[in-house]
Image (cartoon, grey):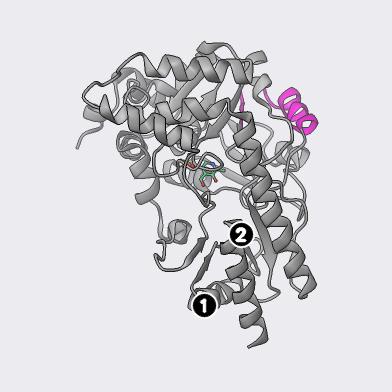
């Protein structure tokens, strides 16, 4: 398929002007034209384990999913919307969603865009703000999707090690590439759950080059009580804050995500697909997300349940001599087995418990998602069996 078919002329011209070759255009076209599907399936072999297939009869605490689906109010709203499924947009559903988000986040409506999940805008930010001469800078370990896109499109990548239990080291990130196109900060971070303080994010914004963009990925923010950086998206023209409904709201399979940014940044991100992706949201997901977003009591109840399960799990592991990194404020912990994490992952799977992957920087450390009370009891029992075997 030719790139002419998939990327509008304006988008192609912009990419060529910024130094992308015709061959790279083809790759970007495959990535964005096929949307979120491409970000998962066009990945190099090295990233294959990131999307490990779920083992259906195991305890599934490997993919940072929520242990339950949407709140009952969300399921009811999605069900009602399914009845109106003959309409592309029954009653300005996107506007209704944005109105709720605007009032909760105190952001202008024109700074809010909804996506089918956050994988697309994450990947799209790398394409839009990086190039073969403008690199990407991230912490390490962090969520690898941005690395994958940078690899795929040929943008230079710098990964800056973080200390266990700490957030991104923003000063070292800027030093690693003082002329980058995009600085990516995930807070709470996947896989560590650690927070990058707002003061550090503000420092990075004030000290980075004027034409660089800072992307703050707050996929896990509702699991934490730390403050959001959303207000920065209203104040600045070089900050994007990203959210997803795939985590605390339990909508990973329903697909809904958000970006908060100045309209000029969103215009840039749209150049490559003529808004195809944002115009085609599933209305069931939009309705479901809308009714949950301002339900502070239900959000707190779910967060408290996760924190109780996380605390109990960390206490159990520590009592039994297993090292857990401190500082997680999200639905995941980093467990240092002091031996290859892949071996422990396999041994636990034999006990029907599927934990998460490890990152090359810390090969003895596994990410373990916090699931239900029952999930975590089974995980703890399986760990005891394996370490005592
Ligand atoms: C930090 C982070 N950002 C973005 C995503 C993408 O999630 P989704 O496309 O389901 O919104 C994930 C998924 O695990 C994630 O952990």
Q: Quadrant of residue 116?
A: top left
Identity of the residue drawn at 56% across and 16% down: 102
Where does residue 42 sit, x and y in percent of width and height?
A: 35, 49
- Secondary structure found at label 2: helix
Q: Is residue 126 left or right of residue 283?
A: right
Identity of the residue drawn at 34% across and 44% down: 38
Q: For this rendering, which residue is in front, 366 or 267?
A: 366
Q: Quadrant of the C terminus?
A: bottom right
Where does residue 213 sit, x and y in percent of width and height?
A: 60, 26
Q: Quadrant of the N terminus?
A: top left
Callout 2: 10 Å neighbours few (<14), some, many (20+)? some
Q: Is residue 307 above or below residue 352?
A: above
Q: For this rendering, which residue is in front, 381 or 18?
A: 381
Residue picked out by circle 1: 351
Residue picked out by circle 2: 373
Q: For this rendering, which residue is in front, 333 or 121?
A: 333
Identity of the residue drawn at 57% across and 38% down: 219
Stretch of the chain drawn in magenta: 198-215
Does 213 appear in magenta? Answer: yes
Q: Quadrant of residue 297?
A: top right
Where does residue 293 sit, x and y in percent of width and height?
A: 55, 28
The first of marks 1 and 2 along the sequence is 1
- Secondary structure found at label 1: loop
């Amino acid at each position: 398929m030719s790139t002419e078919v998939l990327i509008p002329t304006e988008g192609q011209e912009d990419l060529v002007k910024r130094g992308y070759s015709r061959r790279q255009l083809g790759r970007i076209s495959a990535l964005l034209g096929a949307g979120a599907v491409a970000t998962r399936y066009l990945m190099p072999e090295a990233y294959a384990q990131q999307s490990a297939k779920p083992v259906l009869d195991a305890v599934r605490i490997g993919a940072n999913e929520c242990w339950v689906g949407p709140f009952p109010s969300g399921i009811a709203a999605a069900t009602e919307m399914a009845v109106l499924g003959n309409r592309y947009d029954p009653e300005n559903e996107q506007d209704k969603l944005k109105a709720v988000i605007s009032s909760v986040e105190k952001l202008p409506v024109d700074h809010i865009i909804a996506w089918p999940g956050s994988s697309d805008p994450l990947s799209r930010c790398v394409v839009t703000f990086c190039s073969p001469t403008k690199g990407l800078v991230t912490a390490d370990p962090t969520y690898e999707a941005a690395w994958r896109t940078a690899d795929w499109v040929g943008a230079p990548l710098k990964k800056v090690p973080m200390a266990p239990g700490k957030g991104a080291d923003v000063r070292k990130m800027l030093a690693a590439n003082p002329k980058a196109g995009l600085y990516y900060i995930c807070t709470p971070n996947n896989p560590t759950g650690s927070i990058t303080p707002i003061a550090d994010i503000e420092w990075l914004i004030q000290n980075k080059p004027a034409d660089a963009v800072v992307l703050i990925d707050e996929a896990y923010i509702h699991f934490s009580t730390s403050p959001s950086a959303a207000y920065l998206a209203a104040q600045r023209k070089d900050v994007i804050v990203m959210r997803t409904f795939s985590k605390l709201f339990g909508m990973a399979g329903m697909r809904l995500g958000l970006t908060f940014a100045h309209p000029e940044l969103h215009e840039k991100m749209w150049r490559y697909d003529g808004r195809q992706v944002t115009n085609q949201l599933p209305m069931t997901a939009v309705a479901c997300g809308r009714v949950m977003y301002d339900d502070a009591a239900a959000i707190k109840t779910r967060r408290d349940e996760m924190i109780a399960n996380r605390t109990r799990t960390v206490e159990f592991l520590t009592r039994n001599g297993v090292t857990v990194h401190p500082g997680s404020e999200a639905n995941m912990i980093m467990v240092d087995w002091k031996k290859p994490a892949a071996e422990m992952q396999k041994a636990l799977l034999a006990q029907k418990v599927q934990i998460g992957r490890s990152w090359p920087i810390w090969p003895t450390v596994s990410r373990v998602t916090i699931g239900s009370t029952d999930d975590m009891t089974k995980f703890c029992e399986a760990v005891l069996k394996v370490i005592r075997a």
